Structure formats: structure tokens, C-alpha cells
Amino acid sequence: MDCLNCGAPLTTKSCVCTFCASVNDTDLRAIGRHKTASAGSEHVCPRCEVKMETVSLGTGDACTVERCGECLGMFFGPQELDAMIDASVTRVHETDYERLDIIVEEESRSREQVKYVKCPDCRQMMHRKSFGRRSGVIVDSCRHHGVWLDGGELAQILKWVAAGGRIHEEKKQQDRQRRELSDLKLRRFQAEQERMGPSLRRYAGEDFLVTFVRGLFRLLR
């Protein structure tokens, strides 16, 4: 994405142009349709400590979020971020690993100093966690009230999802579950063998092992 003022390419996860210092609204540009509500927010920005505004995102059923007009950070309520992503990025059926590699490379060059922030609602310190594998985005999360994204992070997340990052993550999770299930079955088989006497163990073990291997092949296909 390029700067609207000078046309220079913007760095990953940054709203500020390194050439002309203009602030670019990369997140709302990535979404497309949006509208600023007339009523402001009662919460203050956890970074700038100024009153935030309320923005209605034009994604299916209107999603309303709170947004800082200075740093362009956004606060999403529980499940609002996932709902907005689902409405904004559609028809992704496979993973573009080349694009994901580029996203990871860009992110590794744009690491910023870690600074914890307070939840705009309860004012308790938020926890930092990675948004998906290889997305390059560390979100600030309150277990009860929602997720805070710094300016530019939403555009980065949407780019990662469009490249098939979430599909890649779901596949990895399914593979882990299959391996865990296989390990569990193997441990049960070994425990059963230990409980059997030596004479029964050989015959029962052979029978069970054949069944287990066949089931394992069916599971991994």
C-alpha cells in the first residue's frame, strides 16, 4: 500500500509514511466502506489517552468499533474482529505460501518496541498474543472486553487472511489433533499390553496392532 500524499510505499504495520511523515488510514482503506458515527465513544485511547470515535464498518451486518483519530488504533468487542474479517475477506480456498513468506519477511524488518496497554473498558493491563501463525501481528487482548489493534495491524491481518494464513493455521491444527489422537491410541495399546500376561500379549497384540495400523492409515489419508 502506498502513501496517499507522496506515493511512497508504506512499511508493514505502519500508518506513518517514512518519507513525508503523513498519517495514512491503511486499515479503513483495506476494508473499503466505513462511516464515522455522530456519537463519540466514552472510552479513551490506551496509547494517546484521548477520546475515541465510533466507526461503523460497512461489512455485512454493520460492525461498530471504537477508533482513535490520532494513532488510528481500533478497539473491537468480543468476536467483532473475527466477524469483520469473515465479512471482509471471502473466497479464500487455498494457501499462497509465497505471499505468506513475503509477509513474514516484511514483518521481521518492522519489529517495534513492546509496550503494554490498558483495556479501554476496564483499564486493566491487556495481554499480548500472536494473531495466528506467521501473521506478524501481536494483538493486545482483554479476556472480558475485546481486542486492541494498533494502526496498520488490521490491514496486516486482512492481508494474511487473504493469503490463506488462516487456512494454513487450521490445517496445522488438524494435523496436530491427528497426531495427538494417534499418540493417545498408541499409549492405550501399550498400557493394555502391560496388563496382559506374556502368553496372551503376543496373540492379542498382533491382532490389535493390525487393527490399529489400518485405522491410523484411514485417519491420515
Image (spheres, rainbow, N blue to C red):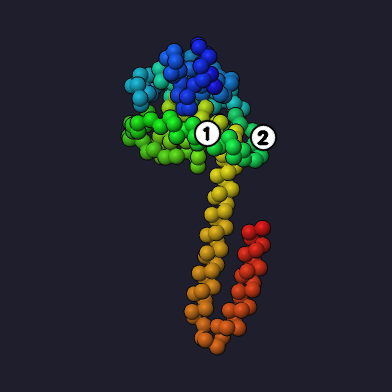
Query: What's the distance in space between the residues labelled 1 and 2, CA to CA?
Result: 20 Å
Residue at the (65%, 63%) spot, across then down: 217
Residue at the (51%, 86%) spot, across then down: 197
Percent of width and height locating residue 62: 57, 25
Is 186 above or below relative to 76? below
Q: How many other residues sit within 10 Å of disc 2, few (<14), some (14-19) or many (≥20)?
A: few
- Secondary structure at badge 1 equals helix
Q: Nearer the viewer, residue 218 or 100?
A: 100
The label nearer to you, 1 versus 2, is: 1
Residue at the (60%, 29%) spot, across then down: 88
For the view shown, which residue lies furthest in the top direction? 5
For the view shown, which residue lies furthest in the bottom direction? 199
Residue tagged 2: 91
- Secondary structure at badge 2 equals loop
| Mark before the other along the chain sequence, 1 or 2 | 2
Residue tagged 1: 103
Q: Quadrant of residue 213?
A: bottom right
Is 97 above or below relative to 199? above
Say which quadrant the C terminus sits in.
bottom right
* 47 relative to 186 in the view: left or right: left
Which amino acid, mark 1? Ile
Percent of width and height locating residue 135: 50, 37
Q: How many other residues sit within 10 Å of disc 1, few (<14), some (14-19) or many (≥20)?
A: some
Residue 146 showing in the rendered view? no
Percent of width and height locating residue 43: 38, 24
Residue 183 showing in the rendered view? yes
Q: Nearer the viewer, residue 74 or 205?
A: 205
Say which quadrant the N terminus sits in.
top right
Q: Quadrant of residue 20?
A: top left
